[in-house]
Amino acid sequence: MHLAVYTDAAERGGAESMLGHLLERLDPAWRISVVGPDEQVVRWLAGRRRGSAPVVVDRIEGRSDLNHMVRHRRVLRSLDADVLHANLSTMSSCQWALAVAATVPNLPVVVLEHAPMGTWSAASTRLKRLTSARAAAHVAVGEVPARTIERLGGLPAGSIRVIHSGVPQEQLDPPPRPDDVFTIGILSRLDPVKGVDRAVRAVAGLDRPVRLVVVGDGPERPSLEGLVQELGLGDVVELRGWDDRARDLLPTFDVYLLASRLEAFPVTIGEAALAGVPVVATDVGSVREAVVDGETGIVVTPADTEEGTVRALTDALRTLQRDPARRAAMGRAAALDAVDRFDVDRSVAEWEDLYRSVARRR
């Protein structure tokens, strides 16, 4: 089988990491091509699987960009793939590439949705309906985002199936902890939707000493640095930037915090659970499909105001800060639960079955 995967991502995020895990573990007999406009992302993904072919194409800038649409079509036809997998980080991702793919004869398309973030415009919504109707299969990473995307996109109820993202178990190599200060960790792209600003404000209300370690980078970094300075948290908050071995840091955290405003199925929760770290997370997307509230972590219902949500996050973190025995028990429960809940082999098997089924129809 020849599987082509398409991404229009301009940077590596959770959607690309999940795709990388999948590519690494697919049947080794399959041939893989990775297609997209960002050379760094395309080559990084292709590098996750030995022998994969990176194919860099010019980005389609809009509906009037016919030259690049024609080039996309020429590339997709020349690949002669059995299946094209489109990896969408938002509902409007890859929309012009999907429109082009719909014109290529005998090319079945599988669409994977990672986030229930609404389309860009009414025209984008119409295009979403058209390309979704032409897809051989439409998949989301969780039940809540699947139903939300159907509603926001005006798609038929039940038209999106769910395949939860698996999380590979890794032998971690954590650095030694510098001290026994209560440490909260976040692995995240620095983007407003990820709620790192909420995390900073929540930590400001905790008992000292306390530490918040944020691993990741992105466009919100300057404003977060300003917020840390404004709140006088320079000795509390560490913005460490991107780290390819970020998972090694998880065992050095007492609690993993996900303060997101919007999520689909957050894989970092699974990574934290496998490392035996309890989670405090806002109730967004499929968080409740990943966290057993009160057993493997604490799920915080967002309040009507940002201030209320921050207070609720502070209260949940304080509960675990003051009760080491409870957070240790939650960590043990999380590690046991994660082995089944985030089984990467099961997820890969579901994808392989789907690809084969779609390819047979071809």
Image (cartoon, rainbow, N blue to C red):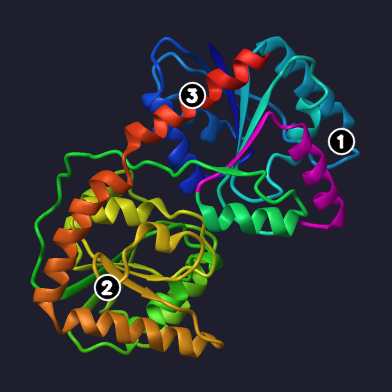
Q: Which residue is mark 3?
A: 353
Q: Earlier in the sequence, mark 1 or mark 2?
A: 1
Q: Which residues are magenta?
A: 120-141
Q: Residue at x 66, y 12 (%)?
A: 79
Q: What's the amino acid at mark 2? A: Gly
Can the viewer see residue 188 in this picture? yes
Q: Earlier in the sequence, mark 2 or mark 3?
A: 2
Q: Which residue is mark 2?
A: 294
Can the viewer see residue 54 in this picture? no
Q: Residue at x 68, y 26 (%)?
A: 57
- On the image, which quarter does residue 311 sit in? bottom left
- Can you tell which of label 1 and label 2 is closer to the viewer? 2
Q: Residue 234: x and y, percent?
A: 31, 79
Q: Residue 244: which numbered mark, if any?
A: none
Q: Residue 59: x and y, percent?
A: 72, 35
Q: What's the amino acid at mark 1? A: Asp
Q: Earlier in the sequence, mark 3 or mark 1?
A: 1
Q: Residue furthest front?
A: 158
* C-beta proximity under 8 Å, tags 2 and 3: no
Q: Residue 157: x and y, percent?
A: 69, 51
Q: Residue 65: which numbered mark, if any?
A: 1
Asked whether 139 falls inside the magenta stretch, the response is yes
Q: Residue at x 43, y 41 (%)?
A: 17
Cα distance in 3D space between marks 1 and 2: 52 Å
Q: What's the amino acid at mark 3? A: Asp
